[in-house]
Image: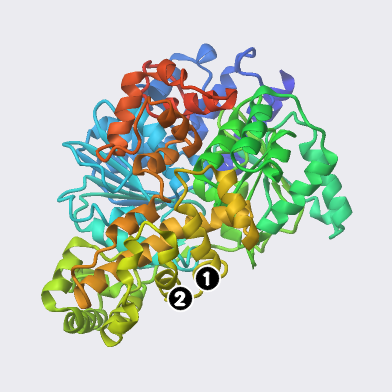
Amino acid sequence: MMEIFAACSEINDLLNSGNNLAARNLLIRLLNTIDRRTSPYPQVLNQLIRTTGLFPYLHLESATWDQKFVHEAFAVDVGNRTATLHREQSSVLSKLLDGKNIAVSAPTSFGKSFIIDAFIAAKQPNTIVIIVPTIALMDETRRRLYKKFSREYNIVTTADTPLEKRNILIFPQERAFGYANKLPSIDLLVIDEFYKASVVHDKERAPSLVKAILKLSRSAKQRYYLAPNIKKLADNVFTRDMEFIELLDFNTVFLEKHDLYKEIKGDITKKESVLLSIISKRTEKSLVYAGTYSEIEKISNLVTKHMAEVDRPHTSHFARWLRTNYQSEWSVADLAERGVGVHNGQMHRCLSQLQVRLFEHQKGFDSIISTSSIIEGVNTSAQNVVVWKSKLGRSNLKDFTYRNIIGRGGRMFKHFVGHIYLLDAPPPEETTQLDISFPDGILGSLDEDQDKASLTEKQIERIVEYKNQMSSIIGPENFSKLRKEGTLQDSDSDFLLSLARSLASSPQDWRGFGYLNSDNPNDWDRMLYKVVGLKPSGWDGSWSNVVVATKALAQNWRDDIPQILNTLSPHNIDIEDFFKLERAITFKLAALLNDVNELHRAIINPSIDISGFVGKLSHAFLPPAVYHLEEYGLPRMISKKIHRSGIINFTSNDLGLRRALNIFRQMGLDEILRTDGLSQFDKYVIRFFFDGILPESTNPIVSTK
């Protein structure tokens, strides 16, 4: 007890001297040493918690009446439950409720997204649009909001979902364009990870995100932008009328750094030994940031060689499930048998979801090895974060991303202190100023009248020039229709203009375009090669692999993944290549073919329409409901078993995602679990899936972030 009072005295001195950050850090470290379940907090400790604004941490059993009053005063309805906000969360929420447009930069542990829930519960708006950077984060956000608000709101995540009176729309920016003209009014537009609108931070996504922000902002009454680690926000047209709130010093956990790279000094043997010493204890959850795919492979080989298998029901069943449904000899299964998961942006969504789930399960994975996908895709955290390599793909890690990675250490109430183990030297510290420029390539998709306030005179001239040139090629009516309906998906106007000119000048080169509608994949070769060649550098591999994989995917509903991999094996396409290619085909190739199709109809032959083929591509040749259900956590191989058992006919023409979900809810978990041929892990996955499509049935009182 004397040690507690001595620490409290030091914290109080820091507060009196104005050093709030050091005081809060010391307070959090003190809380880490006390078991709040068995040890009542002294009055002085509760008072310091109150003074620092960490109201959720107040220990009510030993609190005075005024401390209890503060805890209650900062409690808000967040949808079917009440939670206490910390001081800065409450300040941000108050500004939102006052109708202000705000951009917030705060630590990962701040709880920025949690404020959205409180806003919805308090304001009960009709329409909220939430733009997230990845499908994985979309599913995580959907699960959270569905449990809380699905009784009052239509939760929308796919482009073909009908709107109702009250809607919460959640998706990556690419899916936003289908709704831009369907939403006459948006009560709150949320842009999560809005730093990705800068080409400095995400060259690939920035143009489409900027385009989405502009289009959606036209009808948005209020905007809320969220980002970590931004110290300054440069003047730009996208946030000019928003209040920028920088709260990087308000942390709710403490990060204790261990500069082990100074001892390792580049010795790979020492580095491997240190990593194994951290993760082989199996007593703490560790997130290992590998930096690159090749480094993941190195770590995987190290773990497989030196760590023994563990006998745990969930991880052992998962490993067997992987060997049966994907590949019998696969490093991901080897790692699962040792209590270690893998997360990257290439593998099937359901695999990433399941591994994060197993990582968060007490008796699941002890560690998870990841690229940057885990900081972009999910809001998971760990007691330990290990930085194995200060790389982001081929580039050196920047301070901004590094802080985002280590911000995954610690979690409110669970791990007050997050341990950061640096096995490679961190990048130099930088004061990150966010600069959001206007990509000239998107100008053609904008309107010189509607977007006039956001444009310079020179940019308006470029829009008018693009409009005139495209109109002269495809006709004013056709061009007006394409723009109004938002049919063209590519954000690069220069590319679209070049494509239109090519079609107009060489229509003979496109003879046989309609063969893509053929049921025989061998008829697709010439046109697929031609279309893939339009963007030669965008496929992360050879053109022939894209074509070969597209034809193999045509059997995706009939054949299982091991059969498809066997078909691709003679072309030296392994399981990792398969994941990359399926992703490229369903997103890049489908979008490219859509634009070619629309311009081909407008310029060469309106009677040839391959939109049906494009739809099949975008769903990986699976029934649409099956493809979208994977985003909800139900893998295709389980959907196939349900289909073969006659429980749900996924090939029915009128079975969309919404109807499929309603059928699942009506039938109930127990009925689906009686499907023929389900393995133990299949049943675990189905329970996880149902957990994400059912609203909360209870109304607990919690105090959390």
Three-letter residue code for mark 2: Gly
- Say which residue label 2 marks: 533
- Say which residue label 1 marks: 543
Q: Residues within 10 Å of mark 1 (few under 14, many from 20)?
A: some
Confirm or deny contact between disc 1 and disc 2 (CB under 8 A).
yes
Q: Is residue 335 visible?
A: yes
Residue at 37 percent across and 24 percent down: it is: 694
* Residue 489, placed above or below residue 95: below
Q: What secondary structure is marked by label 1?
A: helix
Rendering coords of residue 32 (x, y %):
66, 28
Residue at 31 percent across and 64 percent down: it is: 594
The quadrant in which residue 440 appears is bottom left
In three-dimensional space, the C-alpha distance between marks 1 and 2, rounded to whole angstroms, equals 7 Å
In the current view of this chain or complex, which residue is farthest to the bottom? Answer: 505
Rendering coords of residue 539 (x, y %):
51, 67
Viewer-closest of 165 and 573: 573
Q: What secondary structure is marked by label 2?
A: loop
Q: Is residue 168 left or right of residue 64?
A: left
The quadrant in which residue 527 appears is bottom left
Viewer-closest of 170 and 71: 170
Rendering coords of residue 495 (x, y %):
35, 77
Q: Which mark is residue 627?
A: none
Viewer-closest of 210 and 417: 210
Indicate how the structure is coloured in the image.
rainbow
Image quarter in which the N terminus is found: top right
Viewer-closest of 325 and 469: 325
Q: Is residue 79 visible?
A: no
Rendering coords of residue 642 (x, y %):
43, 28
